[in-house]
Image (cartoon, helix red, strand yellow):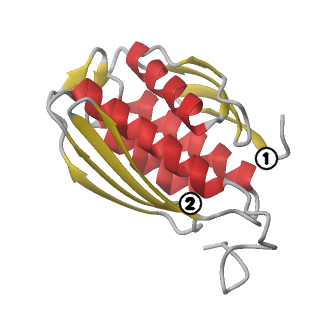
Amino acid sequence: MSERTATITRETAETAIECTVDVDGSGTADVDTGIGFFDHMLTSFASHGLFDLELSCEGDLAVDDHHTVEDVAIVLGTAIDEALGDRSGIVRYADRRVPLDEAVASVVVDVSGRPRFYFDGAFSQAAVGEFTSDMARHFAESLAMNAGLTLHLAVAGENAHHEVEAVFKALARSLDDATRIDERREGAPSTKGTLDG
């Protein structure tokens, strides 16, 4: 594991989550949320972002998938924020467009410490397996709020599976780009000298 690693646990009446993330990993993932498609998306997120991710969640899936997806995003975002520390030396900004067949997702991110989220688009079907399609949007929003990201996300397509998968891959690629260390830089990438909000 690299120095930029964090482990977060969170337990509520709705979910119990353990998460370890290494932002300088090789893309390995061990994920179990109880939602097969969500596991696939988180594994894809780790693989395409080159993050090492260990995550388990026991959630109230008898209700629906909302609490599980939202709380995983909260915990993962918190872990990424903690792993990045004071963000010294990072690239900070990135943007990626990722296609998957007819679908395309666009992500523009600023690892700013100031959480904001904007979304443009819609998902073509209501669900993919046991995963509610709009939870991809809510996952990205919750991740941004807890990782301290300004995040602009857009998606278009005709197949919700492709649209959601493109979203997770674009998130991964842009975060990998933005969190990389720029060897030319010392300290925080800000004229203020800090990225603390």
State which tag comes first along the sequence, 1 or 2. 1
* Residue 14 appears anywhere in the view: no
Tell which residue pokes out farthest to the bottom in this image.
191
Q: Is residue 190 above or below residue 181?
A: below
In the structure shown, which secondary structural element does the residue marked by tag 2 occupy? Answer: loop
Along the viewing direction, whichever of 66 and 165 lies nearer the viewer? 165
Question: Which residue is tagged 1?
Answer: 4
- The reply to whether discs 1 and 2 touch (Cβ–Cβ < 8 Å) is no
Where is mark 2, residue-wise? 148
Disc 2 crowd rating (10 Å Cα; few below 14, some 14-19, many 20+) is many
**60 lies above or below 26:** above
Residue that appears at 42% across and 16% down: 35
Query: What residue is drawn where x is 46% and y is 19%?
Result: 40
| Residue 86 in view (yes/no) | yes
Q: Amino acid at mark 1?
A: Arg
- Which quadrant is home to the N terminus? top right
